[in-house]
Amino acid sequence: MTLEYTGRLDDGTVFDTSKQSVAEEAGLAEAQPDREYTPLTVDVGAGQVIEGMEEGLVGLEAGETDTLTIPPEEAYGQPSDEHVEEFETDELRELLGGQLPEEGAYLEAQDGSQGEVVHVDEEVVRADFNPPLAGETLTFDVEILEVN
């Protein structure tokens, strides 16, 4: 299935889209200059997109449009303390070649996930590796271009 989509948060903020014009309007194109905004092709049932989107796409035909509202439980889940990692300040400083990150900076884990530094003191550094959209209800406007 190939579709165009625009994803919004409850407050109307566009966080993702397949459309270049929407991306430019929302400031996403500027934030990710290397990204190409093109229709998304998904194999429904293969787990390539979040659960709520996958369920919402089932049965849609080419030419149809729909709005999918997806609760956190079917998207990125609720934020959890389990995803907040704690590092010893001295060890982290060594790992980073003598530098210490400031609050608001991001650390990258070995699996490529990003964690926002939320606390720094002499003893510990805490980084939050919860998905940025954890806890959010997501709304996707979708337009089905092709069903194969």
Image (tube, rainbow, N blue to C red):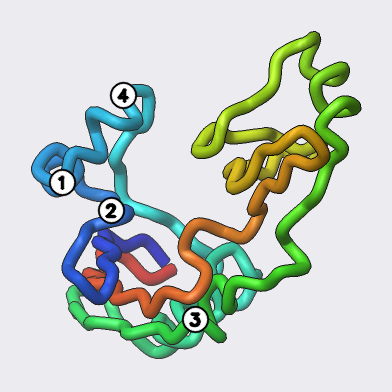
Between 110 and 89, the residue placed more toward the observer is 89
The disc labelled 1 sits on which kind of residue?
Answer: Ala
Asked which quadrant contains residue 62, the reply is bottom left
Q: CA distance from mark 4 to mark 3?
A: 28 Å
Residue for badge 3: 72
Query: Which tag is nearer the camera, tag 2 or tag 1?
Result: 1
Residue for badge 4: 33
Between 38 and 35, the residue placed more toward the observer is 35
Q: Earlier in the sequence, mark 1 or mark 4?
A: 1
**Residue pictured at 23% horizontal, 82% vertical:** 67
Image quarter of the C terminus: bottom left
- Position of residue 144 measured from the top left corner of the image (x, y, whole percent): 27, 70
Q: Secondary structure at mark 4?
A: loop
**Residue pictured at 20% horizontal, 71% vertical:** 11
Q: CA distance from mark 2 to mark 4?
A: 14 Å
The disc labelled 2 sits on which kind of residue?
Answer: Thr
Residue for badge 1: 26
Q: Secondary structure at mark 2?
A: strand
- Compared to residue 47, the image places residue 39 above or below, namely above
